[in-house]
Image: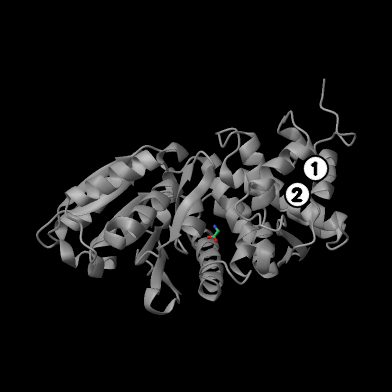
Amino acid sequence: MAVKPPETIRVELGGRSYDVLVGAGLLDDIAHHAAPFLESYCSRPVPIVADTNAREHHGGRIEASLGAAGYETVWYDVASGEASKSWTSLEKLTDWLLSLGITRSDHVFALGGGVVGDLVGFACSILKRGCGFVQLPTTLLSQVDSSVGGKTAINTSAGKNMIGAFHQPSLVLADTTSLATLPPREMRAGYAEVIKYGLLGDAEFFAWLEANSHSVLAREDEPLKYAIATSIRAKARIVAEDERETSGVRALLNLGHTFGHALEAETGFSDKLLHGEAVALGMVLAARYSARRGELSGEDAKRAAIAIYASGLPAQVNELGLMCSGETLVDHMRHDKKMEGSGTLPFLLLKGIGQAYMARDVELSDVAAFLDEELGRADGALPT
Ligand code: GLY
């Protein structure tokens, strides 16, 4: 059977433009797809920083492709999980890259999910004031979101992604076959970000997802590739318009994230609630809050919740078993990176399916009352 060519999506950013390739088997042919970014390694090994699971699953085929093209590889393992996005990990990684003699014209390869991509991207943004990097995302979430757009960061005691930089990759290879080994829960968590693109700006895509979620989650080749490529095209358009999130356009990508971030903080950024699951719940809350404000029809709010629930994602916050009030969740929001000096927290809300907008008139006390209702404690009382 003939191998289908990958789809190429260009992120148009002038001198920082780059391609995102989406297709099956890209890592098997990495020497070809990443050829321009390998040339500087003719007499040195290619540095690949990898999530340990991703290396176990995909390291062999990368080595085979690079080996056949005459390249050696040198690997740096990163433990799975947010704890690897730390100052300590950053220091160790940059020390390792410096020990290899990486120059500003070299490219470091990042294999894995968002943790590896964010860590490597940030390391490369500061290494000798900036060297190149190539993203090899192996999770659905990193393929449709974190590997594209140049947001890089580590976490600190003040919160997630508090220290970081905008540093665009030179290439992204989203190999759809790498999702075959992804646990179903992680697949669904990544799918929440796919639904996000439909909800925020593409009603037609949302309707397609309503009809095809099963095929995408079952990883059927064509529906999967279509869902990923459509998501990346949406992100590429948004990033090209507002690379540094200054005009409000890129902020649309934060749909579901303000509510979601509060839920993640309350659950300790733990496995109890994965980031994508928090975003899923956050989108349901954003839709329901929009309906409460009279800006979205109850029917559309229900449609959003059903699409999320039907994908096996959490859609009801009162089922999380949280022992907190709405005010506690709002307190987490006060520490959100998007909180402005004036005390305003912009909220991404919905006017319709595919019509997200930024509301700047949201009173946090009203959000707390709404959340008390959603948590099933309209009187604000905690369960005894
Ligand atoms: N993940 C949101 C953004 O890239 O802006």
Q: Quadrant of ligand 1?
A: bottom right
User: For residue 285, which numbered disc appears in the image?
Assistant: 2
Name the foreground residue: 119 vs 306.
Answer: 119
Q: CA distance from mark 2 to mark 1?
A: 8 Å
**What residue is disc 1 on?**
371
For the residues bearing labels 2 and 1, Cβ distance under 8 angstroms: yes
Q: Amino acid at mark 2?
A: Leu
For numbered disc 1, what is the local secondary structure? Answer: helix
Where 206 sits versus 95, above or below? Answer: below
* Closer to the camera in the image, 13 or 298: 13
Q: Earlier in the sequence, mark 2 or mark 1?
A: 2
Q: Give the residue displayed 62% in from the left and 54% down from the top.
A: 213
Number of marks in the rendered image: 2
Depth order, front residue of 226/91: 91
Q: Is residue 97 left or right of residue 169?
A: left
Q: Position of residue 237 (x, y in %)?
A: 54, 73
Which residue occupies the extreme left position in the image? 43
